[in-house]
């Protein structure tokens, strides 16, 4: 009895027998176990099939459409690339899924070309970028190098937000920046708003100490602003006891402050008296000059405050204890003060006092008025000693940079421009000015050459008429009769 056989046609099995026959490219019939047979001949994918009795059957061919043709071409290309068919069309028995297992190509037809697992997979790789910053999470307790304390310290950690506390030096440094900005804009409310975020209850006495200490190194106008700031902060940011505690710190540190500011006791006495007048501290605070915890400098400051408060109508005059400095004063007031300090200098001939008075005016942009007034005084005095004193003052102001060269030159040129009016009151003004300029030129080089060349000279009377062709007229002209 002939054994049952299975026919495979186009990848499908026909259960007509128990053995499968495949045709190779040469037409020989081969069993699945490799032994040749002579029963049924079957062609794969179309062709001629041999029956058991030797009859030949043809598989009916069905025409393929365009879509099926493209699918066949695609399958053939993939089979040729993947190595399904061996050399000369021999079958390759490597399973396609097994071949794709270790392939680094994309599983789809069109891959992105990226490394597998982001570079973390594969043999001999470093892992994903950034993974080196993390410690190994899997630690073996049986490892002889295993540290149980380090393991517990790294796994039993509780993170909490910690706000660093500001220390006293940091507070003073930030507060100095706020005060320097206040000297520019002069708005006390901004200082109070800034202190709300920085100030602690134990640091409130430092406010008075810091602001007065900064004012020691500034001018009278900034000291006036400091007194106004203390008055405005009272009741909002600091209390009466805080201000008194701040003045106590200043009185105790006066010996150190005097190394940089020798007149610190005098200035501190003014601040204390002004605070009493502004009702920021009680009057009894200033009348405690005999306190045993103070040295002689602290007692001197309280004596200064007591003197100012004991003056007739002293409390009303303490509003101007720092004067009205800066450019807020009227021009006429500044001119009068300059004239008074020049007259005081001509009487005393004290250059240091004159320099201090000029600095206290705090009008560096208006120093040309000082030069103008000094030259006018020299022309009116018609005295050689006055010329020598004013010349020495100009030389000192130039060498100490109190008056800039531009302001000096502007003052002289203002005199040049007004000489036609000055000579009406001072007939010898041209000759006195010429002599004074020569003296200044010999005293130093604070006058420029152009300024000396531009000195005005008085015009002479003309003896020649412009329309006579340069002929001199005869004084005695007799007409012939």
Image (cartoon, grey):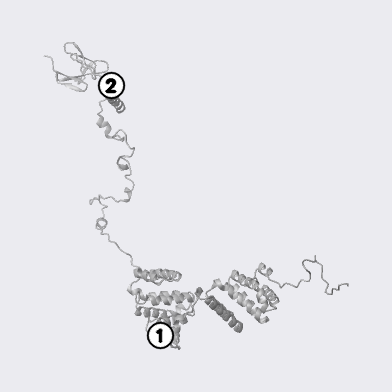
Q: On the rendered structure, is 479 left or right of 42?
A: right
Residue 57 drawn above or below residue 244: above
- Mark number for residue 90? 2
Horizontal and vertical percent for residue 50? 20, 13
Graded by Cα atoms within 10 Å as few (under 14), some (14 to 19) or many (20 or more), the crowding at tag 1 reads many
Q: On the rendered structure, is 387 left or right of 197?
A: right
- C-alpha separation, residue under disc 1 versus residue under disc 2: 118 Å
Horizontal and vertical percent for residue 254? 44, 80
Q: Quadrant of residue 128?
A: top left
Q: Quadrant of residue 452?
A: bottom right
Mark 1 lies on residue: 286
| Towards the viewer: 220 or 136 | 220
Residue beneath the point at 70% across and 78% down: 428
In this figure, what is the number of numbered marks?
Answer: 2
Q: Which quarter of the figure is the N terminus placed in?
A: top left
The reply to whether residue 260 is visible in this rendering is no
| Towards the viewer: 411 or 428 | 428
The reply to whether residue 175 is visible in this rendering is yes
- Which of the two discs, 1 and 2, labels the residue nearer the N terminus? 2
Q: Quadrant of residue 24?
A: top left
């Amino acid at each position: 009895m002939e054994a049952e056989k299975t026919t495979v046609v186009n990848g499908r099995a026909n259960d007509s027998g128990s053995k499968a026959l495949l045709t190779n490219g040469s037409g020989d019939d081969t069993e699945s176990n490799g032994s040749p047979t002579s029963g049924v001949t079957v062609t794969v994918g179309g062709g001629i099939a041999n029956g058991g009795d030797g009859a030949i059957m043809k598989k009916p061919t069905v025409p393929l459409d365009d879509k099926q043709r493209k699918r066949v071409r695609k399958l053939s290309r993939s089979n040729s690339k993947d190595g399904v068919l061996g050399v000369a069309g021999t079958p390759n028995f490597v399973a396609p899924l097994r071949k794709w297992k270790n392939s680094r190509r994309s599983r789809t037809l069109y891959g992105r070309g990226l490394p597998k697992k982001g570079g973390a997979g594969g043999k001999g790789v470093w892992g994903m970028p950034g993974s080196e910053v993390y410690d190994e999470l899997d630690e073996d307790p049986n490892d002889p190098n295993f540290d149980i304390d380090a393991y517990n310290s790294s796994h039993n950690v509780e993170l909490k937000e910690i706000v660093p506390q500001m220390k006293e030096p940091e507070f003073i440094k930030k507060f100095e920046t706020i005060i320097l900005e206040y000297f520019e804009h002069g708005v006390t409310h901004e200082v109070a708003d800034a202190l709300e975020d920085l100030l602690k209850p134990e640091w409130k006495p430092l406010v008075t100490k810091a602001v007065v200490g900064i004012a020691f190194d500034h001018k009278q106008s900034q000291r006036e602003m400091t007194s106004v700031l203390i008055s405005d902060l009272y009741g909002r940011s600091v209390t009466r006891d805080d201000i008194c505690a701040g003045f106590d710190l200043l009185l105790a540190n006066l010996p150190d402050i005097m190394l940089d500011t020798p007149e610190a006791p005098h200035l501190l006495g003014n601040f204390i008296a002004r605070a009493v007048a502004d009702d920021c501290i009680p009057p009894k605070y200033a009348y405690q000059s005999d306190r045993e915890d103070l040295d002689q400098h602290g007692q001197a400051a309280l004596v200064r405050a007591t003197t100012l408060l004991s003056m007739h109508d002293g409390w009303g005059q303490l509003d101007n204890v720092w004067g009205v400095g800066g450019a807020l004063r009227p021009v006429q007031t500044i001119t009068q003060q300059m004239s008074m300090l020049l007259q005081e200098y001509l009487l005393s001939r004290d250059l240091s006092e004159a320099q201090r008075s000029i600095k206290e005016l705090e009008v560096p942009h208006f120093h040309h008025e000082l030069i103008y007034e000094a030259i006018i005084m020299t022309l009116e005095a018609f005295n050689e000693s006055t010329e020598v004193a004013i010349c020495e003052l100009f030389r000192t102001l130039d060498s100490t940079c109190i008056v800039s060269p531009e302001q000096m030159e502007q003052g002289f040129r203002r005199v040049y421009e007004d000489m036609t009016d000055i000579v009406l009151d001072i007939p010898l003004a041209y000759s006195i000015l010429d002599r004074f300029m020569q003296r200044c030129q010999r005293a130093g080089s604070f006058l420029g050459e152009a300024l000396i060349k531009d000195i005005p000279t008085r015009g002479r009377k003309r003896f020649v008429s412009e329309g006579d062709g340069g002929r001199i007229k005869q004084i005695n002209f007799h007409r012939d009769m």
